[in-house]
Image: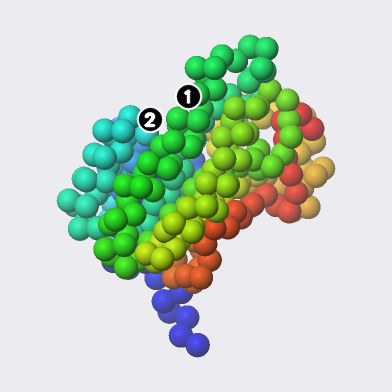
């Protein structure tokens, strides 16, 4: 068995949204380490440029493109600039997401706030899939990875907008696999458990962490690199017959803020 090509991304181009920090940055670094050209996409251009520079300084090939995923013209610009620079697109990591986990009480949240969560977490992913698919079809290789969450299957208070948007991502991914499969485009999702990122640090306390670990067989919280490893699997040829799947990376358990 020739294993040399299983994780070889040489000549492939990957767009990672929210790529400047956290899971997005780790994914950029991971895909670059295995040979991909990387587009670090983020609404914070300065941070994206810093990440791209770090990758280039380590021998990779990366560029930064600013993108607010809630603006259609920004998504079109992201795809157009990527193709102009690298000649094609093979991998998309739809990593951008947001919400107000634990602060979405139906007694307080407005319809407009609920809508904005879906615009960022669901609509932007669907639109970017639509924009990159023709380029992946032309290239003869396509892998789309949507970032979901354990919140998509857990039940917790004051998180209805975020959690339902992530559940929508799971089912959207499964259905789009049927649409894109005939064009040799795979689409999968990753559901991280509690992962040490800047976002989690704003709500994590020692008490919450201790409670989470009671329900986590691998007795630690996740690191960004843990999620990036799953991104690598889905992006690489080794997963060439895997599509429409949701992989939960959570230490074998579940972690919620109200434990």
Q: Quadrant of residue 69?
A: top left
Q: Is residue 132 left or right of residue 247?
A: left
Q: Secondary structure at mark 2?
A: loop
Q: Residue 181 is drawn in which quadrant?
A: bottom left
Q: Earlier in the sequence, mark 2 or mark 1?
A: 2
The tag on residue 156 is none
| Number of residues whose C-alpha sits closer than 10 Å to that of mark 1, classed few (under 14), some (14–19) or many (20 or more) | some
Q: Position of residue 46 (x, y in %)?
A: 30, 32
Name the residue tied to disc 2: 70
Q: Which residue is mark 1?
A: 116
Residue at point 70%, 52% (across, down): 251
Whole-percent x and y of residue 10?
32, 68
Which residue lies at the image location 57% right of the left edge and 40% below the top edge? 168
Q: Of residues 164 and 63, which is closer to you in this image?
A: 164
* Along the line of sight, the residue nearer the viewer: 99 or 30: 99
Quadrant for the C terminus, please. Answer: top right
Residue that lies at the very extreme toward the right in this rendered image: 214
Is 76 or 11 nearer to us in this picture? 76
Horizontal side, residue 93 vs residue 222: left or right:
left
Q: CA distance from mark 2 to mark 1?
A: 9 Å
Furthest-bottom residue in this view? 1
Labelled pair 2, 1 in contact (Cβ < 8 Å):
yes
228 relative to 107, above or below: below
Q: Is 17 on the left or on the right of 239, as rendered?
A: left
Residue 221 image position (x, y, % from top left):
67, 44
- Residue 100 seen from this side: yes
Helix, strand or loop at disc 1?
A: helix
């Amino acid at each position: 068995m020739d294993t040399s090509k299983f994780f070889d991304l040489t000549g492939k181009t990957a767009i990672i949204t929210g790529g400047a920090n956290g899971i997005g940055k780790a994914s950029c670094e991971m895909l670059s380490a295995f040979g991909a050209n990387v587009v670090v996409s983020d609404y914070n251009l300065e941070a994206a440029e810093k990440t791209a520079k770090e990758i280039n300084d380590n021998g990779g090939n990366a560029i930064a493109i600013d993108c607010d995923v809630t603006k259609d013209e920004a998504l079109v610009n992201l795809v157009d600039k990527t193709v102009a620079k690298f000649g094609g697109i093979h991998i998309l990591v739809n990593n951008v997401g947001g919400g107000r986990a634990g602060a979405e009480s139906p007694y307080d949240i407005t319809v407009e706030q609920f809508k904005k969560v879906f615009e960022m977490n669901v609509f932007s992913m669907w639109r970017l899939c639509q924009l990159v698919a023709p380029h992946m079809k032309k290239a003869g290789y396509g892998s789309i990875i949507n970032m979901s969450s354990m919140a998509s299957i857990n039940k917790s208070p004051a998180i209805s907008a975020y959690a339902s948007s992530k559940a929508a991502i799971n089912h959207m991914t499964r259905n789009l696999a049927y649409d894109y499969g005939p064009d040799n485009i795979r689409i999968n999702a990753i559901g991280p458990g509690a992962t040490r990122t800047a976002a989690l640090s704003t709500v994590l306390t020692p008490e919450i962490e201790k409670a989470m670990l009671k329900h986590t067989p691998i007795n630690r919280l996740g690191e960004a690199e843990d999620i990036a490893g799953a991104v690598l699997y889905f992006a690489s040829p080794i997963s060439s017959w895997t599509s429409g799947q949701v992989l939960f990376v959570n230490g074998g358990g579940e972690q919620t803020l109200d434990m």
